[in-house]
Image (tube, helix red, strand yellow):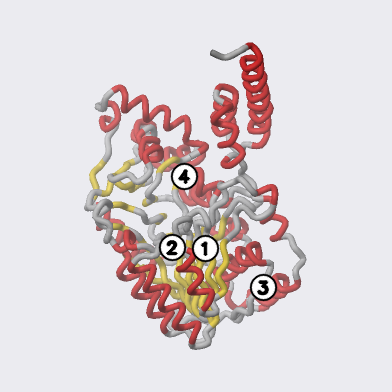
Amino acid sequence: MFDVESLTLFGLIALLLHALGVLTALHAITRSKTSQGAIAWAIMLVMFPYVTLPMYWIFGRNKFQGYVRARRSDDKGIRHVLERLQEYRSVFRGTLADDHCGLRVLERLAKMPFTRHNRVGLLIDGEATFSAIFAAVDAATDYIVVQYFIVKDDQVGRQLHEKLIAKAKDGVRVYFLYDEVGCYKLSKAYLGEMTDAGIAVRPFQTTKGWGNRFQLNFRNHRKIVIVDGRTAFVGGLNVGDEYMGRDPKIGPWRDTHTELAGPVVQCVQLAFLEDWYWATHEVPELNWDPEAADGGEQEVLALASGPADPFETCGLFFVHAIHSARHRVWIASPYFVPDAQVIAALQLAALRGVDVRVMLPEKPDHVLVYLSAFSFIEETEAAGVKIYRYQPGFLHQKVILVDDEFAAVGTANLDNRSFRLNFEITIAAADARFAAEVRAMLEEDFAACRLVKSEDLTGRSFWFRLAVSVSRLMAPIQ
């Protein structure tokens, strides 16, 4: 049995934790970017401080101040790059003759222009994506930039590993930036062998600085490969065998990437440079002279977003794209945990007669996110929004199509983490030909889907519906 002194000590500790919970709840209320997030954190902090306090200290922050300060740095190298790109602005800035989608707004949001004389191609699934990336790496003569959220030491990971080491030994400069959270299983041997070959290997360093020591929120979710400043690859695929459809537990993997040439490559490269500078405080010598792509006629924007932005860039991009639709807005995303703004935009678009479709995976890989998506069915269905579940395997692509003139492919999911917490990048093309290619791709995907109805939730057991409701409450902090 406990003696009086032990009980008194236990009571004082409990009182202190509850007091800290209340104070931290006040902090969450004043700092959270959404009322739902503030309420979710406040309730959990007051009711269950023993568990929630460390969770808040790790996951509760939504602004990456260290990165903000680095971005504002007056480092001459970064300023020189920006000045260099400004010299080409008049030559390569897009014309945007038909601006019905309000594309100039996206330029202001991205703080980057649409550029012309680009070529953007779709890479559908892993075989096409990695074949194109490996071919470009093999052809590199000056430098290679590789930036991923997840890299695994498996068959495809080893292929990349061996090719990068071979190019480094041939005198090609290689920069390898990885996210510590996404690559937490990546072995020291994998990284060490690249370092020994002369590759500049760096973690993104989410936890760099005392103020970031325990937080895990600000993940670098970007997937970028750049070769010689002439070719770039951006999209949904990380480096791992499951992205090739080789994991028997997951099955076929449906994903989309893009291959880029033209001035947009320098815009993608600038996003990498900011991340590299945060991680290293170094400015590598890269090719900052944009060049028109052979046969390139497409106007393209590289929209980088993250928790260091003055606005919620990623979320605003989706809201604006949905609001601008006149005929159709089709979205494919592995995760559907939208905030109130996105739900309202989808509802309004459907109510004004727009063909609104959202494609999600049938198979879950994150249970809470999977359950949360069910909670949005009734309110979207009532307005005419159609939600589909992809059947053949896991759907991981992040794609949006607006009417017949605008399409985007990138790394951002339709959830709170991508909107507010992750570093993401989206390639948006104001081009009818690219939009037609995306439309044909998505039509084939929709043919492999089933339409979701409200009965998918109401017909389930009480316990399933309760789990969905609880997951919905947790949505702002997932």
Q: Which amino acid type is marked by label 1? A: Tyr
Label 2 and label 1: CA atoms lie apart by: 8 Å
CB atoms at circles 2 and 1 under 8 Å apart? yes
The residue located at (62%, 21%) in the rendering is 14
Question: In the rendered view, does 206 fall on the left or right side of 375?
Answer: right
Question: In the rendered view, does 361 fall on the left or right side of 335?
Answer: left
CB atoms at circles 3 and 2 under 8 Å apart? no
The image shows residue 154 at horizontal and vertical percentages of: 35, 65
Quick one: label 4 or label 2, which is nearer the N terminus? 2
Q: Which residue is mark 1?
A: 178
Toward the viewer: 443 or 261?
A: 261
Q: Residues within 10 Å of mark 2 (few under 14, many from 20)?
A: many
Q: In this view of the protein, can residue 263 be seen by the observer?
A: no
Mark linked to residue 283: 3
Q: Which residue is mark 2?
A: 151
Quick one: label 3 or label 2, which is nearer the N terminus? 2
Toward the viewer: 251 or 456?
A: 251
